[in-house]
Image (spheres, helix red, strand yellow):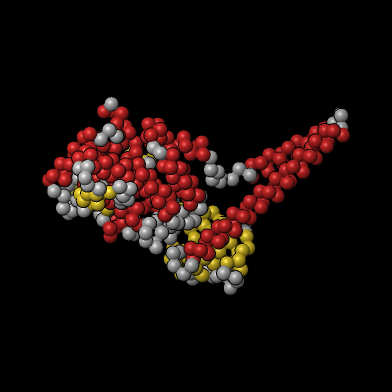
Amino acid sequence: MKVEFYYSQRKYECMVVVLPDDQGEKKELRIRNHEGEILAIRQGQKTALRGKSRATSQEVDILKNNYYNLIKAAVNALDLAEKYKLLKDKDEEIRLLNAEIAIFREKANLSDTERGEILQLRDQLKTLADQQNIAAFNYDEQETESKLIKRLGAKAWENIEISSKNDLFSAYKHKYLVESDIFTEDFSDYKPSCLYIASVVEREIVQSFFKSFYHFLCKQNPMRKDFMIAGVILKNRGKYTIGSLPYLIAKEWDTFSDEILNRDSLSIADRDRLYYHKVNDQKISTSDRQLVNEFLEQWDHPVSNWLSGNQKAASKIDQIAKLRNLTAHPMPIYKWQFTELWLLVIGGKTKSGRNQKGLLKEIYEKSNAIH
């Protein structure tokens, strides 16, 4: 289907073609301008070919020179055209159905020819119905909740706050809306989903820890209203960052390399250099560390068991903090970065096919095992 659309006051044509690929078939989006130049974008690629013929075309970076916005405009135009076509097909389906009903009403005894006509009408109806079976993202909250419970576990889902559940719903919805566009999903901005997921970690782990720790310190020191532990100021109604927590619970942990983390894609070589071992460079006294340990021992909360002496917990929290900090930058959150965050918090299948457990499930499963 060829569709005309306007972008930046210029007229374009676009269409999707299916091309053979080493792994089967891949879709290619083609956008033609008024000068006859074509921008051809292969599904999942961050580069495109631009030119009047494939032989003379040049490779261009989709993320530069407004190509990305042009591609999104083309995809939107195709989507609208498809929806309009579905509406027209629906009208045609109703017309044919009414025609069939009218035949039945008018004829008590049908000839073989008339029966054949009815069968033909039914075939047309079936064809139209099949044409409407186009994959689309339909947000179903109950289905999404079932998927989240499967990932997190019933215990975690039961215990997290309503606000956290709503944030996870929003993250899930945005994730699949982005991924429904096969031409731009790898370099679309997953920032909203990242913020929603990070908010859950901040609420369920970070704020919960610091709020309870502050009350613990107040009980031990009734005359004081604020405390400084490992460079973190604890006070009433204090706001705390995800990145401050690892310094209070561990001496060392594994985290992301900033150099690799800021890349728009992750190669196999980059994967091998994605992590490095970090030593706690924040000065925390022996007495302060003892205070943290005493607090964790008496804190009756599933997070306490997960944090206690757990270097892996510190690693995961610091990695989440680094991914959360990326959202403050003007660059988008790319799919691979978002996937790292999704796996850390919610869990799922890794590229190697291994099932990774998210930290929310870890926390509540560990709590169940202890009890």
Q: Is residue 128 above or below residue 150?
A: below
The single residue placed furthest to the left in the displayed view is 286
Q: How many marks?
A: 0
Name which residue lies at 32% across and 42% down: 208
Whole-percent x and y of residue 48? 47, 63
In the image, 24 versus 256, the foreground residue is 256
Is 241 on the left or on the right of 130, as rendered? left
Q: Is residue 66 above or below residue 20?
A: below
Name which residue lies at 72% across and 43% down: 93
Name which residue lies at 31% across and 32% down: 365
In the image, 169 versus 264, the foreground residue is 169
Q: Is residue 233 above or below residue 100?
A: below
> Is residue 320 visible in this depiction of the protein?
no
Name which residue lies at 28% across and 26% down: 371
> Is residue 196 visible in this depiction of the protein?
yes
Whole-percent x and y of residue 147? 45, 37
Whole-percent x and y of residue 233? 25, 52
